[in-house]
Amino acid sequence: ARRDQATAPAMKRRRGPSTEFIGRVRQRSVAERRTGRCVAQGSAGSNAVDEVFSANCRELLMRVGIGYDIHALKKGRRLVLGGIQIPHTSGLSSHSDGDVLLHAIVDAALGSAGLGDIGDHFRDTDPRWKGASSARFAKKTLAMLRKKKLSIQNIDTVVIAERPKLTLYKDKLRRSVAQIFGLRVEAVNVKAKTNEGFGPVGEGRAIAVMAIVSLRDES
């Protein structure tokens, strides 16, 4: 047995991170908590340290907001969703063009950035927005995000409508939203649901949208 032990190949001992390495990671994490932002790459003096993202840093890198909007359908108006016109007998009643999909996305983006909600910035009593394209709301929201060094990472939405049926328009809506917000199509998702006959949406009298937007901190 002794001979076997003597001739057996020496097992390599797995070495853990050095005390110096752990110290640099801890210093970086403390700096993140004090400043409220992630430390720039290279500031810790080691590429290896840069690869270790603390939980605190990951949280600071991304923000998430939820948005919601609902509008009644009204005869004689165009139905505009995601910046495109959808054939239907009624459109959404609103001070602007009534694009409930873009409204919910803007609402979510503003919330994620800590900038309030869509009503705080685009009031339905402001004559500037009378009949305005909701794509203008999107562009102004993107400008506000840029001032805070934030950018949209992805958008996920649920459009709830009994009529018209939107399944055939999902891809077109997705591409239009991506173009308006300057994103890759893969970063946008549009789901179409009904309300199974319940409430004003289920009765075909309104359309509602829920949206989630995640933001990336570019600072």
Image (cartoon, helix red, strand yellow):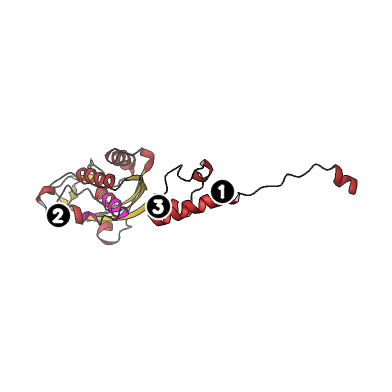
Q: Residues within 10 Å of mark 2 (few under 14, many from 20)?
A: some
On whether residue 187 falls in the magenta region, the answer is no
Residue 186: where, in percent of width, then height? 39, 40
Mark 2: which amino acid?
A: Asp
Q: Nearer the viewer, mark 3 or mark 1?
A: 1
Residues under labels 1 and 2: Cα distance?
56 Å
Residue 6 — which label? none
Q: Residues within 10 Å of mark 1 (few under 14, many from 20)?
A: some
Q: Which residue is mark 1?
A: 21
Mark 1: which amino acid?
A: Phe
Q: Residue at x 56, y 51 (%)?
A: 22
Residue 106: where, in percent of width, then height? 26, 50
On whether residue 115 falls in the magenta region, the answer is yes
Q: Which residue is mark 3?
A: 60
Q: Quadrant of residue 43?
A: top left
Comparing 195 with 186, the one in front is: 186
Tell me which numbered mark, 3 or 1, is placed earlier along the sequence: 1
- Please give the range of residues in magenta: 106-118
* Residue 204 in sight here: no
Mark 3: which amino acid?
A: Leu
